[in-house]
Image: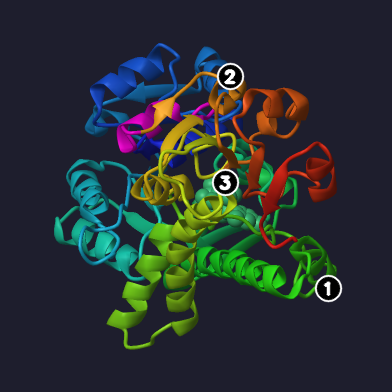
Amino acid sequence: MKIAMVGSGYVGLVSGACFADFGHDVVCIDKDESKIERLRAGVMPIYEPGLAELVAANVKAGRLSFSTDLASSIEGAQAIFIAVGTPSRRGDGHADLTYVYAVAQELAANITTPTVVVTKSTVPVGTGDEVERIIRESGTEVQFAVVSNPEFLREGAAIGDFKRPDRIVIGAEEEWARGVMREVYRPLFLNRAPILFTSRRSSELIKYAANAFLATKITFINEMADLCEKVGGDVQDVARGIGLDNRIGSKFLHAGPGYGGSCFPKDTLALLKTAEDYGSPVRLVEAVVKVNDSRKRAMGRKVIEALGGDARGKRVALLGLTFKPNTDDMRDAPSIAIVQTLLDAGAEVVAYDPEGMEAAAAIMPEVKMVSSTYAAVEGADAVALVTEWDAFRALDFARVKGLMNAPVLVDLRNVYDPAEARSAGFAYSSVGRV
Ligand code: UDX
């Protein structure tokens, strides 16, 4: 089956490479010529474990190619995916659908054979209707259907998530389009992955509801962590104690510095906008957004507290900058607010991140980036572990302590056992544990 993927960013590239690996004939399209050139040369625009190898293998097998020319690339494709960005619109938090609609217009002018247009980009309820209207009003006589098929890929684990999904959601109104989508996901059908067919609008909402729910779960445990610190509890015990209840589940109950990334912050805001537009407020999610926003700076204050309440002239080493490990993505990373809080308080900030420093340097030019953990901690008055990269999970405590100016460790990801860190001589604080 021939599949065209319009947009070769994170989602488009991972999905395109995985579809090719399923045996489909896939072309990934992007307007960015240098990106396509680099992809042809095997250079990935993003860091994602296993992606470069998957792309190389499928290019070699002749199932995956890259192009900047939409019109010729979509010829004969039975499914055309729209996987372009839907950033937050400046000013109001609405998802910016400019790119999605531009693709719809281009498709309308260029489809020549029956095709299913699939929105993979995260789009607000009703976007599929608009895409359909754009194509229909172009006057095309070619048979087409517009389907919603949201992605649930976690950065750093995207290929595994694609190939072994918890579920696949397909919002389609026409039976023939469902048939095409069954064919697209055939290998997963054979593996009995749960595939849920819904209306297009339900499918669009499922994506936002899932992300808002997960953001709520994280925010809930983060507030429990704050309470634990006050009452003398241990948030990890609390998380385990509630998570063992199957109705709650143990995942996404790790307390930390707040959620970041390319999805949760943007999607929760967009959901609020949709809810507002339809006069059906989701107050719970409103609270989640506010709590998470203020949490990030609060984590900076936590570091200042560990310094004895005054950060002026002190040197703080941050270990990890990306919003989570195994990615180079800095979008809405808690580290950004933490750095700002520390700088505002007069601290000097040094940082090391295994993959994120290039992107981070552009966002936080005042931070001195160094090339290793031990270079970062040298002469520091406090170390804050911000992102739980594996490289930070087995620090040589004696060496770190020996290099630091004062042995203060703020573990914002609860990586270490408090007793162990303290017996190694650290003034240790973490999240939701005393
Ligand atoms: C998320 C969704 O998981 C994915 O299904 C969706 O398609 C895109 O958004 P991603 O943003 O890659 O994926 O990261 P995820 O692993 O979900 O983590 C999001 C944020 O929540 C990170 O900042 C992470 O550190 C934080 N988090 C996650 C916690 O603080 N605690 C947890 O228990 C889990």
Identify the secondary structure beneath mark 3. loop
Identify the secondary structure beneath mark 1. loop
Compared across the picture, whether 61 is left or right of 79 comes to: right
- Region of the chain picked out in magenta, as a range: 352-366
Check the image and report above or below for 268 versus 231. Answer: above
> Residue 163: x and y, percent?
65, 41
Q: Nearer the viewer, residue 126 or 397?
A: 397
The residue that disc 3 covers is 154
Compared across the picture, whether 41 is left or right of 239 comes to: left
The residue that disc 1 covers is 245
The label number, if any, that marks residue 53 in the structure image: 2
> Residue 197: x and y, percent?
57, 65
**Which residue is pictured at 53% across the width and 21% down the height?**
52
Q: Nearer the viewer, residue 369 or 327?
A: 369
Labels 1 and 3: the sequence-earlier one: 3
Q: Is mark 3 within 8 Å of ligand 1?
A: yes
Check the image and report above or below for 157 versus 266. Answer: above
| Residue 276 shows in the view | yes
